[in-house]
């Protein structure tokens, strides 16, 4: 009997978890989750996204490691020299991918990936390069796949499963960009 290859999947929110988890399992990966998203602002929003990742992961029987606490200062520190898009997002992605790669190394899982690759709104080629950089720095590998083929399916399932779907990317800048009134 061949054992499935383990993969650590960084998870940003429950709706984005749906398709990558399903697809990776279909590829015979044994998927474990990792939740580290200090970019999410404010704390209540972080709590909400975390809660739904926890609930959905339980429903689909996926073990997940949650980094303790709420550390928005780690995100702020990462983006302090560049708070505008697209530079800000590069630092944000790298911070989360780096922590995922470090955790994969710690628990001896050779490969990691991220649910960030399901969103049609994220720069997948930049995420790929940053994932590979984080992987090389930690002696693990980054699994790249364009999960956005499953984005609409995830939208449909998240509505069916009554999962919380956020209305902005996550950080306080994206919240301000969404709510800014143009005159
Ligand atoms: S817009 Fe999204 S990806 Fe960009 S810095 Fe904010 S939370 Fe991170």
Image (tube, rainbow, N blue to C red):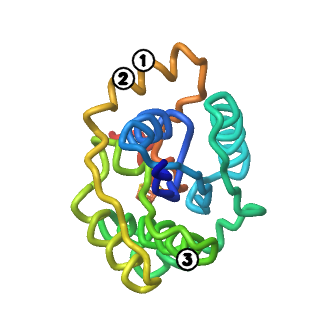
**Does residue 43 appear to the left or right of 49 in the view shown?**
right
As measured in the structure, the alpha-carbon distance from the residue carrying label 2 to the one carrying label 1 is 5 Å
Q: Residues within 10 Å of mark 1 (few under 14, many from 20)?
A: few
Q: Quadrant of residue 77?
A: bottom right
| Residue sticking out furthest to the top | 160
| Residue sticking out furthest to the left | 125
Q: Is mark 1 within 8 Å of ligand 1?
A: no
Q: Is mark 2 within 8 Å of ligand 1?
A: no
| Mark 2 residue element | helix
* Numbered label attached to residue 153: 2
CB atoms of marks 2 and 3 within 8 Å: no
| Residue sticking out furthest to the right | 69
Q: Position of residue 142 (x, y in %)?
A: 36, 67
CB atoms of marks 2 and 1 within 8 Å: yes
* Numbered label attached to residue 156: 1
Q: Nearer the viewer, residue 75 or 126?
A: 126
Residue that mark 3 sits on: 105
Q: Nearer the viewer, residue 65 or 117?
A: 65
Question: What's the residue at 47%, 70% (across, down)?
Answer: 110
Question: What's the residue at 37%, 82% (across, down)?
Answer: 136
| Mark 1 residue element | helix
Q: Quadrant of ligand 1?
A: bottom left
| Upstream in sequence: badge 2 or badge 3 | 3
* Numbered label attached to residue 37: none
Q: Quadrant of residue 75?
A: bottom right
């Amino acid at each position: 009997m061949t054992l499935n290859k383990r993969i650590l999947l960084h998870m940003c929110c429950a709706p984005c978890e749906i398709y990558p988890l399903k697809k990776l399992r279909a590829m015979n990966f044994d998927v474990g989750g990792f939740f580290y998203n200090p970019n999410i602002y404010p704390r209540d929003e972080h709590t909400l996204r975390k809660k739904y990742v926890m609930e959905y992961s339980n429903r689909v029987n996926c073990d997940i490691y949650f980094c303790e606490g709420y550390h928005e200062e780690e995100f702020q520190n990462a983006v302090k020299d560049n708070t505008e898009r697209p530079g800000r997002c590069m630092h944000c992605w790298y911070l989360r991918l780096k922590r995922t790669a470090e955790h994969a190394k710690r628990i001896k899982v050779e490969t990691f990936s991220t649910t960030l690759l399901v969103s049609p709104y994220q720069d997948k080629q930049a995420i790929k390069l940053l994932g590979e950089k984080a992987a090389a720095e930690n002696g693990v590998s980054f699994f790249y796949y364009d999960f956005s083929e499953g984005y609409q399916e995830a939208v449909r399932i998240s509505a069916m499963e009554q999962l919380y779907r956020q209305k902005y990317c996550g950080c306080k800048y994206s919240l301000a960009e969404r709510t800014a009134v143009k005159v």
